[in-house]
Image (cartoon, grey):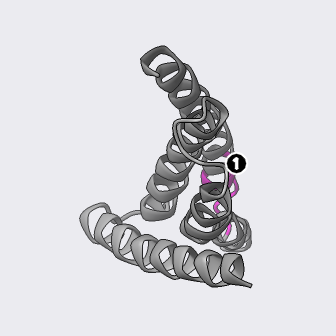
Amino acid sequence: MKYLLFIALGGAAGAVSRYLLSGWAHALWEGKWPVGTLLVNMLGSFLIGIVFVLIEKQVVHPDWRSVLMVGFLGAFTTFSTFSLETISLFEDGHAMHAAGYMLVSALSCVLMAGISIHLTRALV
């Protein structure tokens, strides 16, 4: 039961962090692309790679996996929002923007996770 509470606390922190960072980025970069969501997804993908390796290398206790990966990062990343925004771009007649956004989001987030895994393994 205590793990559920810790996951919930991590999720609350992740959701608030996502809201603040995404809102800040959207305010700075207005345009067709939802840059705030892209930034949050890239950062979340990068951070999940770091947490993965720190747990793998036993630098962080495995009990933190639920709090950090499931709770915080699960609430922080926003692929459900990404999906809705992509569909909205398509429905608004911006098919090329939607396709570009999907491609950049998928590739950059996978790239960020891969980079963080390799960097963290090299440092730990």
Query: Which amino acid lies under the numbered mark 1 shown in the image of this protein?
Result: Ala
Tell which of 34 and 43 is nearer to you.
43
Query: Which residue occupies the foreground of this view, 7 or 41?
Result: 7
Q: Secondary structure at mark 1?
A: helix
Q: Residue at x 60, y 66 (%)?
A: 67
Picture coordinates of residue 31 (x, y %)?
39, 63
- Given residues 43 and 64, the one toward you in this image is 64
Tell me which residue sits at (53%, 52%) in the image: 44
Q: Position of residue 106 (x, y in %)?
A: 68, 42
Residue at the limit of the structure toward the top, as seen here: 122
Against 90, residue 45 (above or below) is above
Q: Which residue is mark 1?
A: 99
21 to 45, vertically: above or below: below
Q: Is residue 42 magenta?
A: no
Q: Position of residue 90 (x, y in %)?
A: 72, 65
Magenta span dominant secondary structure:
helix
> In x, y percent, where is residue 25?
32, 64
Q: Considering the image in quadrants, where does the N terminus appear?
A: bottom right
In the rendered structure, the answer to whether residue 68 lies left or right of residue 19 reads right
Query: Magenta span covers which residues?
Result: 93-99
Label 1 neighbourhood size at 10 Å, few (<14), some (14-19), many (20+)?
some
Given residues 42 and 33, the one toward you in this image is 42
Q: Quadrant of residue 76?
A: bottom right
The answer to which quarter of the image holds residue 73 is bottom right
